[in-house]
Every structure is written in structure tokens, then in C-alpha cells.
Amino acid sequence: MSEPILEYLRASRDTLDAALADPEFVATIGAITDKVTAALAAGNKVLLAGNGGSAGDAQHLAGELVSRFYYDRPAAAGIALTVDTSVLTAIGNDYGYEHVFARQVQGLGRPGDVLIAISTSGRSPNILKALTAARAGDLVAIGFTGRSGGDMPALCDLCLRAPADSTPLIQQMHITAGHIVFGLVEARLFPRSAAPQPVPDAAG
């Protein structure tokens, strides 16, 4: 019974070790952090999109922007394009499911905004169309995908490729990378105030 558990934990460890040993992966996380920080500091916003588990990641990360991550601070502008069922079903019905994110990018995105589009395969048609719409609208197009990249890299300003081929392991790296990015963004935009120093006792 324990062997499948250990096997999965080893695979998770090996994926994380591969990420640690990949300078391009680390550098891309840093570059994404810079782009997101600059956009939010300039008054722009971050749009996030994905399907299935990647939709969950998009919503998770948007929540950490708008609410908080490590500590209380002002809200930051993040919108998950996966949550408005009326918009999703209207676009899906009228234009086709492959347009559910691109249409929202066209309607909500403004030059200087950031789109983070998540697809473990790099081949999801609605994600590829969203990235195309982002580039056309002068948004910063950022992709999170797996080792192969699929068709995403050519459509992205920055493309983070998790060093894995298994969907669950790719997803684990995506949320880990997202936590790193948004933790750093939070610290840069809203640095913690220095703790107040105690007032020394008056000399008696």
C-alpha cells in the first residue's frame, strides 16, 4: 500500500529537483515577477485563465492578488476569466468554447495588462486564442505549461515550462511557481512596515 504513495512523492521530489537545477526555469519565474510587478505598479491588472485544474490555479492565484498572500496589505487587481458562468456560457454558445477566454481578454484587457494563461499541454485551443488576443491587444502574454511547451511558446512574451510531462506534476509546479511570483510581487509592491520598537523605560 505504501509503495504507490512513496513513488508519487519521489516523482514530486524529482520534479522539484529538476526545477531547482534548471536556470531557465528560475530565470523565467524572476522575469514573470518583474512583469507582473511593473504592471500592477502602473495601475494595470492581471488576467488569469485555464481549464479544469488550471482553472482552479487561475482562481487560486487571482484570490491571492485581490485578497492577500502572506500578510494584510492593499488589494491588487487580479481577475480569473473562469468564474462568470453567464459570460462563459454566452461566449461558448454564441462563438464556441475556444473563444471563451479570448473574448474576455478583448473586452477586459487593456494595453499594459498581463495575461497569465495556464495549460499543462500547451495545446488548449481557448488558451492559445487568449494568448493571441493578448498579444494583439498589447497585453503582456505569459504562459504556464509543461516541458514540451506545445504551441504556447511562440505566442508568449514569457513561457514557464514545468520540467515534467505528467499533468499532476506540471500542475504542482505551476502552483508552486505562482506562489513564488505572487509572494515576491506582494513583497515588492507592499513591503512590510518595520515592527515598532519598544519605548525604553525612562531613567529613574
Image (tube, rainbow, N blue to C red):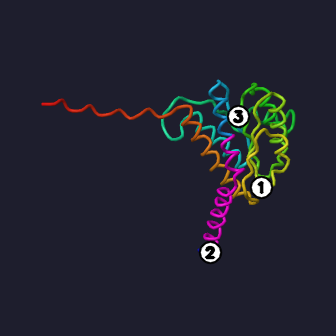
Residue type of the residue flagged with mark 1:
Arg
Outermost residue on the left side: it is 204
The disc label shown at residue 6, or none:
none
Residue named by callout 2: 3
* The magenta segment: 3-31
Q: Report the label total.
A: 3
- Whichever of labels 1 and 3 marks the residue nearer the N terminus, that label is 3
- Kindly tell me whether residue 92 is visible in this rendering: no
Question: Given the image, on which type of amino acid does mark 3 rest?
Answer: Leu
Q: Which residue is mark 3?
A: 47
- The residue that disc 1 covers is 147
Residue 117: image location, x then y, percent? 75, 41
* Mark 1–mark 3 CB contact (< 8 Å): no
Residue plotted at (74% across, 32% down)? 86
Residue 137 locus on image (x, y percent): 81, 27
Q: Quadrant of residue 116?
A: top right
Left or right: 9 as drawn, with respect to 163: left
Badge 3 or badge 2: first in the primary sequence: 2
- Quarter of the N terminus within the rendering: bottom right
Q: Relative to residue 8, is residue 142 drawn left or right? A: right
Q: Residue at x 64, y 58 (%)?
A: 16
In reply to whether residue 30 is colored magenta, the answer given is yes
| Position in image of residue 7 (x %, y %) | 65, 70
Question: Where residue 2 sits in the image (x, y, percent)?
Answer: 59, 74
In the displayed structure, 97 sits above or below 161; it is above
Q: Are marks 1 and 2 in contact (CB under 8 Å)?
A: no
